[in-house]
Amino acid sequence: MKLLIGIEHQLLRYGLIQLIKDVHSVTSMVVADSPSELIQSLKKYSFDLIVIDERLPGTGGLRSVLSVLKGQPIQAKKIFMCPGNSGELELTFKENDIQGIFYEYASLDELMMFFQQVIRGERVVLRMYGHEAKKVGSVSTVLTKREEEIFNLKVRGYSVSDTGKLLNISVKTVENHRRNIKKKLNIDKNHEWIEWAKRLGSL
C-alpha cells in the first residue's frame, strides 16, 4: 500500500504511521508536514491511502486540497483527521469525495477498527460527541463468536483438525472460518495472528 500522511504534529504523525503499519503492510510512504508539500505530493504521486489533518491546509486551504485530491486514482482512500466536528468535511463525505473522517480523542481500538473498515472499502465517520468518540465498534467485535473461538484456538497452537474435533465441526468449516478471520483482520503472515491476539487480549 502506498501511503501519504499529511500531518504537521510529529508525534501524532509517528503514532498514526505505526498504527496503519499494524493494520496493513505499507510498501512506500510520503510524509507532508506543510500545505505546499501536501499539494506537491498529491500532484506528483498516486497513493492508495491518504491521511490528512484538517488543520494542515490552514484557513481557506481545505477546498484547494479537496480539489487536488480529485486527481488521485478512484480507488485511493482519502481520510481526514479533525480536532472537532467539521460540517464542511461531513458534507464532502456525503458527496462521496472522501472515504473517512476521524476525530481526536478516539481510542486505539476505535482507530484500528476505523482504518480496517476504510481499507476494506467501507466509508466511515468516527464521530465526536463532546470529547468522546462515538465507537464504530471495538476490534473484537469484528469477529463472530465462532470466529473468536477459532481464532483463540489457532493462536494457542491448535491444528485445524484438533479445532474441528474440539468444536464438533468439520475441517472444511474450520478452514473457512480461518480464511474469513484472515480477510477481516488483513492477516497475511503467521506472526500477525500473534500480534492480533496481543491486541485483543487473547494472549
Image: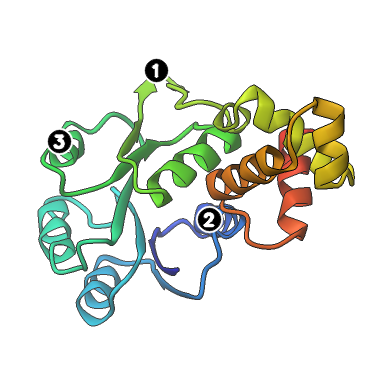
Q: CA distance from mark 3 to mark 2?
A: 24 Å
Q: Amino acid at mark 2?
A: Ile
What residue sits right under mark 1 in the picture? 130
Of mark 3 and mark 1, the one earlier in the sequence is 3
Residue 202 drawn at (x, y percent): 80, 34
Instruction: Determine whether, in the image, residue 198 is placed left or right of residue 105.
Output: right
Q: Would you say residue 203 is visible in this rendering?
A: no
Q: CA distance from mark 2 to mark 1?
A: 26 Å
Instruction: Determine whether, in the image, residue 158 is placed left or right of residue 102.
Output: right
Label 2 neighbourhood size at 10 Å, few (<14), some (14-19), many (20+)? some
What residue sits right under mark 3 in the picture? 94
SS at mark 2? helix
Q: Amino acid at mark 1?
A: Gly
What residue sits right under mark 2 in the picture? 20
Closer to us: 180 or 46: 180
Q: Are marks 2 and 1 in contact (CB under 8 Å)?
A: no
Residue at the image point whose x is 76% and y is 41% from the top: 197
Residue 72 drawn at (x, y percent): 20, 68
3 or 1: mark nearer the eye: 3
Q: Quadrant of the C terminus?
A: top right
Residue at the image point whose x is 10% and y is 61% from the top: 67
Label 1 neighbourhood size at 10 Å, few (<14), some (14-19), many (20+)? few
Point out which mark residue 147 bears. none
Residue at the image point whose x is 21% and y is 68% from the top: 73
Residue at the image point whose x is 49% and y is 31% from the top: 105
2 or 1: mark nearer the eye: 2
Of mark 2 and mark 1, the one earlier in the sequence is 2
Closer to us: 12 or 193: 193
